[in-house]
Image (tube, rainbow, N blue to C red):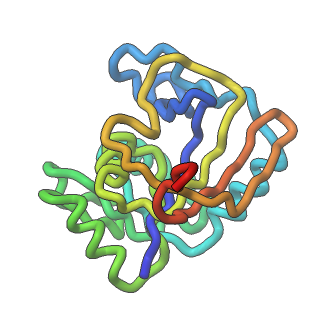
Amino acid sequence: MRKVIVLEHISMDGVIQAPGGPQEDPSNGFPYGGWAGGYDDDIIGTALRKKMNLPFDLLLGRKTFDIWAAHWPQHGDAWPGVNPATKYVASNTLTSHEWKPSVFLNGDVAEKVGKLKQGPGPDLNVWGSGNLLQTLIKHDLVDAFWLMIYPVTLGAGKRLFAEGTLPRAFKLTESILGSSGICIMNYERAGAVTIAGE
């Protein structure tokens, strides 16, 4: 069975919106686009490259796909696995694209992702894709969160865990502390929430 693994740059207060640059996602007037800049870190970079070099397919929202399709075909030397990976894209409007291989998921995305998880292939990595993430979390489809937590609070912006998040327990399976204060934490599902005294 394939796992859905969420990989996110995230602030201490849970914001995942536009870590890479001002124009990445300025929706709702978000003023902090590019907030992850200035935290270059060899330790985190090494861990990130190791993760990126594992076998994977991508599961992306439409906005993230559009941003990546404009960038990665010309920069695949920096991430050799990204262009040959199958890109599964949640979109009700796109049906084809020149960045291949791409498969477009319209209609009931949660049902389609559930079927993808049951099929053959590498794990499905989700980067960015804030709206898609809410659907995956709400339908209990995420198996692991690989979070790069930055030493910053933003106070506003799209958050990883929004309304509709189900109560679930997770276990920490990896932690890496970078020299600039970034922490990588890998959390995998561990069943139901345990209540004290029960």
Residue at the outermost front position:
197
* On screen, residue 2 above or below 75: below
Residue shown at the point (40%, 22%) measured from the top left: 26
In the rendered structure, the answer to whether residue 97 lies left or right of residue 52 reads left
Residue shown at the point (48%, 14%) measured from the top left: 31
**In front here: 182 or 59?**
182
In the rendered structure, the answer to whether residue 111 lies left or right of residue 137 reads left
Quadrant of the image occupied by residue 78: bottom right
In the rendered structure, the answer to whether residue 114 lies left or right of residue 23 reads left
Residue at the outermost right position:
179
Q: How many marks?
A: 0
Quadrant of the image occupied by residue 149: top right
Residue 143 x %, y %: 47, 64
Residue 155 x %, y %: 52, 17
* On screen, residue 193 above or below 165: below
**In front here: 159 or 25?**
159
Residue 61 x %, y %: 33, 49
Q: Is residue 108 visible?
A: yes
Residue 108 x %, y %: 15, 59
Residue shown at the point (73%, 27%) measured from the top left: 38
* On screen, residue 124 above or below 37: below
Q: Is residue 77 visible?
A: no
**In front here: 24 or 35?**
35
Residue at the outermost bottom position:
120
Residue shown at the point (54%, 28%) measured from the top left: 21
Which quadrant, please, contains the N terminus? bottom left
